[in-house]
Image (cartoon, helix red, strand yellow):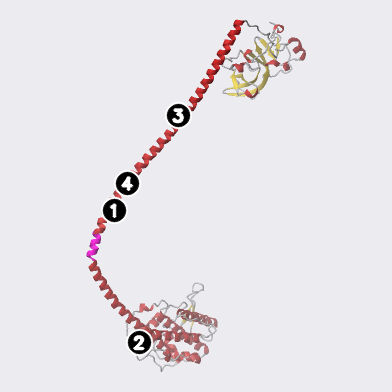
Amino acid sequence: MTILDVPEVTLRLRHLNGIKGRGFAVNKELTDLSGVMFAISLLGPENFGYFYMSRVCENVNYPEWDTPDLSDCQRWILASKGAVFTFFAVQGHTNTMLFEMTVHFSGLVGIDAEVHAAHSTLTPVNEVYFQFSGVLYSPPNYLQQTTCSMQCVRPRHIFRVSPKLSYDFEELQRFIVNAEVMHHQTSRMKTMMQSMNMLQTSLSGILNLSAKREAGLVELDLMKCRLRAAKADVEELRSRLGQLSDQRSLVEDMLEHIACGRAVISERISTVSRATSRTGSYMMKLDRAISFRISQLIHQLVEIFGTELGALDPKNTVSPDTMTEDVTRPIIFVPLSPSHLNLDYPNSAIVRQHTTETVIADHSLSTNQTVNVVANGSGTKSVNSVESDFVLAASKLGMIAQLLRFVAAVLSHPLRHPLDLTEGTSRAKVTDYLAQELVEGEPNFPLYLSRSSLLPAYKHAVSLLNRDLADLRAFVGLSTSVEETTTWNLRTFLQHCLSEKGHKEHEVNL
């Protein structure tokens, strides 16, 4: 059959019975090719993917495929008037797309199979020809215009209108019956659809009931678990109640023992009360004795150092008559150990010597003799002549320092800046314990300064002495005025100590 004998038809996808290719352009980078294949997809929005995949043709440049098997496709797909053909190069287990073309079957033109291999084309690369019902069709852009007009024929675009058929009476009755049957079947289908919807609703309700039943079973299991836990807690509480009952019986036994021993405890308490009363009376006697001893010691200090203080400043003379107690009162001796004095600073042996023995005041000693007794810690009556004002000032400084040390020992209040009166030497020294780690060598300053000694050392010793005196005054509740002299501050301090001790002794006597 020649191309002129081809009837005008409307081409559909179901009429496709072969595809031929020519001049496929394959990239040189693609090696070890197994062949080429194509896939078909629909045009327009219904293009949901490839619905057909061809076999692999090993001839890459001139592939040919026989009639594709489209029996599994639906009718509306087979009735398509166009499709999208995608060609792939197969390389092992992977596919590489070569090109894709959209084909409208009504736009194809038929050519003679005899001249297919001989006619020239405008695009000799990636040419695809389609065979419908034994006729080979080609896209019009492959052929020249003269060749397309002389040797090609286009398929029919639309169906031809068929003349109206004539029916006889029997066929008309048959048609009407068929219409009634169709209407009856339509009503039955509607009824079945309604039944199906009702069944679906019932199934949904059943499924919901099943879900509720499952939830109820889960809650029931949870309640069972909680019940088991509650039972375990009840058992534990019962065991604890049993333990508490045992402990209660034990406590009752102990209470019985306590009731039995109450008389013994009362007797012991009375014994302790009597012992406490005896100890309290003894402590009161001891306090009175200590108070009287302190007052007597301060009175003796005034007798010892009163003359020297008067020599320092005639206005600062301390009279022994300032004491409020009677010195003719018999002395009550109470045994005291040296640890009661709480002496934790150097040269405490001198102070212990003056506090543990009865003081015998020798008023025949001169001022310089008294200074020598205090500074050197010995009872000899050697007389030192005063050759200069520096030596006299240093000796007075040592006397006042020793007096402050003695008063601090009586009050059990350690000095912050004590003066180091070394025993067994001819001159005492002043030690700055606060700055001991900040200076090089021994921070000791001599008390008996000669004319060649450094005056700043004497001034530093006086400043340390003033600090100790201010500390003692603050301890007894007195303020220190920087405008007054050291001797005046010492005089008022001794007067305050005498008045306070006398007042306390008077209260004890009452």
Disc number placed over residue 123 in the picture, else none: none
**Is residue 313 toward the left or the right of residue 162 in the image?**
left
Is 501 within the magenta? no
> In the rendered structure, which amino acid carries the disc numbered 2?
Thr
Kindly identify the residue that appears in the image at 65 percent across and 12 percent down: 131
Q: Dot 2 corresponds to which residue?
A: 358
Q: How far across and down, in percent of the image, does residue 120 sit? A: 74, 14
Q: Which residue is mark 1?
A: 244
Between label 1 and label 3, give the one nearer the viewer.
Answer: 3
| Callout 4 secondary element | helix
Precedes in sequence: disc 1 or disc 4 = 4
Separation of residues labelled 4 and 2 (CA atoms): 83 Å
Mark whose residue sits in front, 3 or 4: 3
**Residues under labels 3 and 4: Cα distance?**
41 Å
Other residues around mark 2 within 10 Å, as few (<14) / some (14–19) / many (≥20): few
Residue 371: give x, y in percent of width and height.
Answer: 44, 88
CB within 8 Å, label 4 to label 2: no
**Which residue was labeled with disc 4?**
234
Q: Nearer the viewer, mark 2 or mark 1?
A: 1
Neighbour tally class for label 3: few under 14, some 14-19, many 20 plus, Cα within 10 Å:
few
Mark 1: which amino acid?
Leu
* Residue 30 vertical position relative to residue 389 in the rendered view, above or below: above
Estimate the x, y position of residue 378 in percent, counting from the top left: 39, 86
Q: Earlier in the sequence, mark 2 or mark 3?
A: 3
Screen quadrant of the C terminus: bottom left
SS under mark 1: helix
Number of residues whose C-alpha sits closer than 10 Å to that of mark 1, classed few (under 14), some (14–19) or many (20 or more): few
* The furthest residue to the left: 260
How far from the left and from the top, in percent, is residue 81?
66, 17
Give the overall secondary structure of the magenta segment: helix
Mark positioned earlier in the residue sequence (2 or 1): 1
| Label 3 sits on residue | 206
